[in-house]
Image (tube, rainbow, N blue to C red):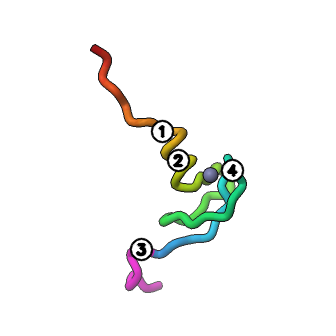
Amino acid sequence: MSYGRPREMHDAVCADCKQKCQVPFKPDPSKPVYCRECWAKRRPPRRDRY
Ligand SMILES: [Zn+2]
């Protein structure tokens, strides 16, 4: 194994929009993979309640 490429991208299919995308981690078949947009959509920035 070589760790010469820290930014290795893996092909994946977004579980939300079903589009092909690439993720910087190895897709886990037991977990849904989301593209960057859907990831951001599902994890909106937290806002502190005031
Ligand atoms: Zn998506």
Q: Residues within 10 Å of mark 4 (few under 14, many from 20)?
A: few
Q: Indicate left or right for 13 with 39 as reference.
A: right
Q: For ligand 1, tell me if the residue under mark 4 lies within 8 Å.
A: yes
Is there a contact, CB below 8 Å, between mark 2 and mark 1?
A: yes
Q: Nearer the viewer, mark 2 or mark 3?
A: 2
- Indicate whether 46 appears above or below 18: above
Magenta-highlighted residues: 1-7
Q: Is residue 6 magenta?
A: yes
Q: Residues within 10 Å of mark 1 (few under 14, many from 20)?
A: few
Q: Position of residue 18 (x, y in %)?
A: 72, 54
Of callouts 4 and 2, the N-terminal one: 4
What's the residue type where badge 4 is placed? Answer: Cys
Q: Nearer the viewer, residue 36 or 27?
A: 36
- The Cα atoms of the two marked residues, 2 and 3, are separated by 18 Å
- The Cα atoms of the two marked residues, 1 and 4, are separated by 15 Å
Of callouts 2 and 3, the N-terminal one: 3
Name, please, the residue furthest toward the right. Answer: 18
What's the residue type where badge 1 is placed? Answer: Arg
Q: Which mark is residue 7?
A: 3
